[in-house]
Image (cartoon, helix red, strand yellow):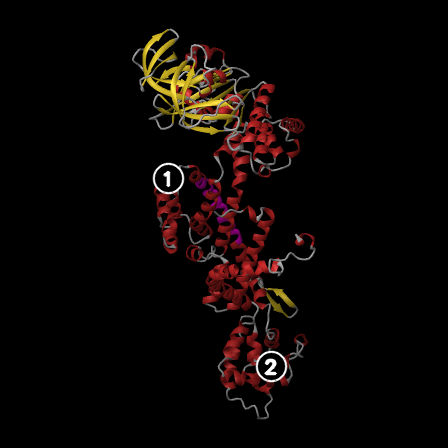
């Protein structure tokens, strides 16, 4: 009874505050729960969060110049790139020192390669100079300015020095500028020349085609999901196996099958020619372009649209439609005003799934996309495995991630993410 | 009955049959007539065909054979949305993505009614079910009973002449159900609309209806006002299905006009009123209501038939006592007595004599 009049915290039987006592009692449970999910957490941390974080950091990381050419970076700080003059002798001397040690460590080509992304030609400048740098006599009285320009007249170009200066900071926006078809010019960021612009075009194309794929998936999946949801359970299960069947076949096999179907000497063209719908000398080009990519990817991603739609439609009792009709609505009004609005969560969930999968897809566009049907992900793959410009690949990936997050946010604002039912 | 039914009913089923699989008839030769303004209940166990009948009337199922007439016109080929029949569904089927007012406005919108007229009608309908303050809410924010009222208002808002209700009170608790039973009947009668109501709850059927059609096995077993149904069941299914009933089996040994003599399987011979036994030698089930059996010697009336019985169980139920007896070899013979100061409470093992009037004892089909 004394508790009733006490205005302080409620106490447990032994006198400790009830809150602390409760927390202690729950701690064991929480620890045990944490232990159970610890392996998964660890796995996700090591295999997902850390690599993704590292890749995102690579999109701005730029310590190769400052690490390989430490003296030059310091010496260049005071140089005004816009003056039109070459840097002072001290800078050239610092460069000679840095080049000698870099050549000895055989890392001079790496920094050359890095700078070459920004200013083509620097790679060979560093390679050629590096060959001689091992024999530099730093004690001798040499005018390094003349000496370096003698070895390669590239050192007499202010642009080269500007590039080195620009990329001497350990963090750079260069990769991101590059990824949106810009570069650092004499007056700060500027657009690249028209013929060098590829990434924004690719990004727009990727978004556009992913949208087309999502829309065609919605149109094709809606009736299928409706039939599945309205059939008796046994038949629905059988049909569901057919829907899931593509998952049991390798992605490569499915994509190759589309190649066989759609190519100019392929099944569809053969049939059209045989039916005299299309003349033999004007067979349709329906692969290795955007059309081929959209067809093949719609087919591959269709189950991801059908499943969430089906799970939502299954929960809508037939009595809603009946009620609407008994209230005087025609079949169409009943569908459009009563049934369709209730399936929007399913459409939303399916669209998010399909769109996000499509935007990052790369095998299928690579195989059936030709040059006009490739996605931004194909460029990312190219920079990861062929050009080895991981920084640019990371920047492109980060932009893609940002676009997806923005779309997700927009979707949440418009439809509401709690309106999404995945199953 | 068929002929008169086809002539003057507002809703008429004329030799209607329904089969889903082409092998079994769910509804077998149904003839039924509902007068204008009548409250008819279709009562029966699940699978008896009552809901199928309702769905055929609403237009969601088509009759395999026979005609359904509404106001004298066959409606077999009229789609549901043109029938103008209001319907209340078992789960209410309120559209979850619309507010209550939008739900009610829906049937008026599809009828292309003007905005101000719509609003006036919606308000009147909501006030009618005392839900006027809830127009802006969503169905999920209402309790079961409130949803029920809204569903009722929605079925009535476009002023149909006929309203169908498919077990509308099934999901409510007992008290609310009793309250709604009263409200629905009151509303239906005051608006003068014809109501066809489907339920498997006999209390609901007895308390609400003008007429009850008892369904079993795809046929109407009896169509009668509630009192007749309870007191004068026409066959043993109805006797068993409506209310509590005691059954004694035997063979008819003699029939004389309005009485017959039955020799029970235990050997006892009793008088009964023959209902649907026609021949001597027929097997019969004799039906006696528990509250028509008397065991107090002073109260057993003149001309009552008496039998010996043994008390097996005495159950105190508050307002009544329910006593289980062994009568003529039947261990499930139940009698009910009102809890009054002058009533003896029986003790298990006690030997008593019970009696009933032959007119309360109906010899039905076996």
Along the line of sight, the residue nearer the viewer: B160 or A26: A26
Q: Is residue A263 visible to us here?
A: no
Name which quarter of the figure residue A327 lies in: top right
Label 2: chain letter: A
Q: Is residue A162 left or right of residue B72?
A: right
Residue extending furthest left? Answer: B281
Label 1: chain letter: A
Along the line of sight, the residue nearer the viewer: A342 or A91: A342
Along the line of sight, the residue nearer the viewer: B213 or B246: B246
Along the line of sight, the residue nearer the viewer: B106 or B292: B292
Q: How many marks?
A: 2
Density class for disc 2 (Cα within 10 Å; few <14, some 14-19, many ≥20) is many
Q: Is residue A399 left or right of residue B361?
A: right
Give the spatial CA distance, label 1 vs label 2.
75 Å
- On screen, A191 above or below A96? above
Density class for disc 1 (Cα within 10 Å; few <14, some 14-19, many ≥20) is few
Give the quarter of the figure containing the N terminus of chain B.
Answer: top left
Q: Is residue A261 left or right of residue A120?
A: left
The disc at residue A72 is: 2
Marks 1 and 2 share the same chain: yes
Q: Dot 1 lies on which element?
A: helix
Q: Dot 2 lies on which element?
A: helix
Q: Is residue A221 magenta?
A: yes
Query: Which residue has dot 1 on it?
Result: A234
- Residue B252 screen position, x and y as percent: 32, 13
- Residue A390 screen position, x and y as percent: 50, 68
Q: Which residues fall within the magenta stretch?
A: A207-225
- Residue B130 screen position, x and y as percent: 64, 29
- On screen, A3 above or below B137? below
């Amino acid at each position: 009874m004394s508790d009733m009049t006490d205005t302080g915290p409620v106490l447990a039987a032994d006198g400790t505050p009830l809150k602390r006592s409760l927390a202690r009692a729950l701690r064991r449970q929480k620890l045990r729960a944490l232990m159970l999910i610890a392996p998964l957490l660890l796995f996700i941390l090591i295999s997902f969060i850390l690599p993704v974080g590292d890749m995102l950091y690579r999109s701005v990381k730029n310590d190769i110049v400052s690490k390989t050419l430490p003296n030059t970076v310091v010496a260049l700080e005071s140089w005004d790139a816009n003056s039109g003059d070459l840097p002072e002798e001290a800078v050239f001397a610092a460069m000679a020192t840095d080049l000698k040690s870099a050549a000895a460590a055989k890392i001079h080509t790496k920094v050359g390669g890095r700078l070459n992304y920004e200013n083509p030609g620097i790679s060979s400048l560093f390679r050629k100079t590096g060959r001689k740098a091992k024999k530099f006599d730093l004690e001798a009285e040499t005018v390094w300015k003349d000496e370096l320009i003698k070895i390669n007249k590239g050192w007499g170009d202010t642009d080269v020095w500007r590039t080195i200066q620009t990329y001497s900071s350990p963090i750079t926006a260069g990769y991101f500028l590059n990824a949106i078809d810009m570069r650092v010019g004499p007056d700060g960021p500027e657009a690249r020349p028209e013929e060098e612009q590829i990434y924004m075009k690719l990004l727009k194309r990727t978004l556009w085609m992913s949208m087309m794929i999502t829309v065609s998936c919605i149109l094709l999946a809606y009736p299928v999901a409706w039939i599945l949801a309205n059939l008796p359970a046994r038949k629905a299960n059988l049909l569901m196996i057919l829907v899931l069947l593509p998952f049991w076949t390798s992605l490569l096999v499915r994509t190759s099958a589309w190649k066989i179907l759609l190519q100019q000497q392929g099944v569809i063209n053969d049939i059209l020619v045989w039916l005299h719908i299309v003349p033999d000398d004007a067979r349709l080009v329906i692969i290795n372009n955007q059309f081929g990519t959209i067809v093949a990817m719609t087919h591959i991603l269709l189950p991801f649209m059908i499943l969430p739609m089906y799970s939502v439609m299954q929960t809508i009792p037939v009595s809603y439609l009946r009620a609407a009709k008994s209230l005087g609505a025609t079949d169409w009004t009943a569908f459009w005003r009563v049934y369709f609005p209730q399936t929007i969560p399913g459409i939303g969930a399916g669209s998010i799934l399909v769109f996000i999968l499509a935007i990052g897809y790369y095998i299928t566009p690579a195989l059936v996309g030709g040059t006009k049907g490739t996605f931004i992900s194909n460029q990312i793959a190219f920079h990861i495995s062929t050009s080895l410009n991981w920084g640019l690949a990371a920047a492109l990936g980060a932009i893609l991630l940002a676009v997806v997050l923005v779309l997700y946010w927009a979707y949440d604002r418009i439809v509401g993410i709690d309106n999404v039912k995945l199953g | 009955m068929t002929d008169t039914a086809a002539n003057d009913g507002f809703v008429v089923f004329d030799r209607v049959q329904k089969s889903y699989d082409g092998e079994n008839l769910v509804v077998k030769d149904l003839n039924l007539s509902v007068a204008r303004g009548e409250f008819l209940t279709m009562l029966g166990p699940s699978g008896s065909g009552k809901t199928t009948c309702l769905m055929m009337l609403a237009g969601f199922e088509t009759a395999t054979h026979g005609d359904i007439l509404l106001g004298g016109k066959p409606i077999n080929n009229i789609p549901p949305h043109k029938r103008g029949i209001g319907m209340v569904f078992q789960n209410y089927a309120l559209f979850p993505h619309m507010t209550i007012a939008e739900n009610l406005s829906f049937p008026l919108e599809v009828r292309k009614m003007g905005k101000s007229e719509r609003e006036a009608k919606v308000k009147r309908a909501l006030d009618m079910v005392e839900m006027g303050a809830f127009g802006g809410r969503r169905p999920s924010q209402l309790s079961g009973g409130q949803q029920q009222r809204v569903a009722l208002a929605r079925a009535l808002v476009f002023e149909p002449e006929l309203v169908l209700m498919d077990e509308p009170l099934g999901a409510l608790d007992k008290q609310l159900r009793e309250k709604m039973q009263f409200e629905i009947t009151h509303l239906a009668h005051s608006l003068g609309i014809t109501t066809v109501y489907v339920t498997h709850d006999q209390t609901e059927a007895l308390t609400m209806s003008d007429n009850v059609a008892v369904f079993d096995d795809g046929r109407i077993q009896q169509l009668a006002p509630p009192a007749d149904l309870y007191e004068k069941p026409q066959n043993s299914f109805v006797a068993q299905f409506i209310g509590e009933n005691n059954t004694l089996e035997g063979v008819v040994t003699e029939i004389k006009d309005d009485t017959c003599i039955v020799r029970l399987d235990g050997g006892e011979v009793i008088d009964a009123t023959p209902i649907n036994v026609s021949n001597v030698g027929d097997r019969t089930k004799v039906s006696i209501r528990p509250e028509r059996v008397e065991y107090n010697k002073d109260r057993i009336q003149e001309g009552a038939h008496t039998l010996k019985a043994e008390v097996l169980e005495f159950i105190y139920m508050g307002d009544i006592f329910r006593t289980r007896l062994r009568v003529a070899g039947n261990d499930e013979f139940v009698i009910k007595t009102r809890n009054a100061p002058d009533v003896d409470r029986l003790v298990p093992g006690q030997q008593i004599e019970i009696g009933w009037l032959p007119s309360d004892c109906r010899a039905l089909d076996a």
